[in-house]
Amino acid sequence: MAEAAFQDIGPDNSLLLVDDDEPFLRRLGKAMEKRGFSIETAGSVAAGSAIATARPPAYAVVDLRLEDGNGLDVVEILREKRPDCRVVVLTGYGAIATAVAAVKIGATDYLSKPADATDITNALLAGDDELPPPPENPMSADRVRWEHIQRVYELCDRNVSETARRLNMHRRTLQRILAKRSPK
């Protein structure tokens, strides 16, 4: 299977993965290597920018929000150094505004986390005039909502009152949601 995927990738199989979630980065790296890509990883905008400048890859998967800045900065460098680079932007925040911004600066596709290696590979290898197939097991609306609440909660340093204020939600309602298990 890896050989068939490699033929679809083309002669330059270099892939840059930029994400500050270390376990996710390792899992995705292993999965993409099995699909025939030659992987380089970066955990920050600075590291991703350095690799994009020194060794611009044929493919890239870049997280939108990184601890030291915005992943779109890496996308801009990739577009400048290698205009034919196929870039997929990943984000835990699936918003139309960020998707439009990513595509405007040259991203090939935009996927919401958690995206699996198959979804990412399909997006990277899709032709310019074809859309990648929809994910086989998309998250439920309840799960997407729960993931968003958890992300905002973590960004607020697990402060319930601040999270409730940012989500425009009553604090007690938020506490009940946080006390429950995650939906499937």
Image (cartoon, rainbow, N blue to C red):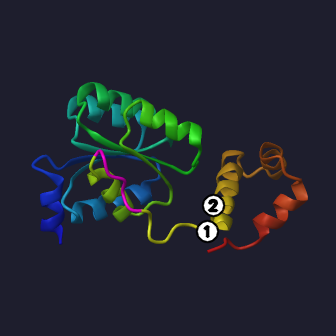
The stretch in magenta equals 128-133
Q: Was residue 183 drawn as part of the magenta stretch in this picture?
A: no
Q: Which mark is residue 55?
A: none
Q: Is residue 71 visible?
A: no
Above or below residue 142? Residue 19 is above
Q: Is residue 145 visible?
A: yes
Q: Residue at x 29, y 44 (%)?
A: 128
Q: Which mark is residue 140?
A: 1
Q: Of helix, strand and loop, which mostly describes the magenta segment? A: loop
The C terminus, quarter of image? bottom right
Of residue 160 and residue 135, the one placed in the foreground of this image is: 135
User: Hey, which residue is sitting farthest left in the picture?
Assistant: 11
Q: Residue at x 58, y 48 (%)?
A: 93
Amino acid carrying mark 1 in the image: Ser
Q: Tell me the CA gap for discs 2 and 1.
A: 6 Å
- Residue 131: where, in percent of width, then height? 37, 53
Image quadrant holding the N terminus, namely bottom left
Side (left or right) of 149 relative to 7: right
Q: What x and y, as percent, mark residue 98?
A: 54, 38
**Classed neighbour count for the residue bearing mark 1: other residues with Cα under 10 Å, few (<14), some (14–19), many (≥20):** few
The amino acid type found where label 2 is placed reads Val
Q: SS for tag 2?
A: helix
Judge left or right: residue 82 versus residue 102: left
Residue corresponding to mark 2: 144
Place of residue 159 in the rendered image (x, y in percent of width and height, measured from the top left): 78, 49
**Picture coordinates of residue 156 (x, y %)?**
72, 45
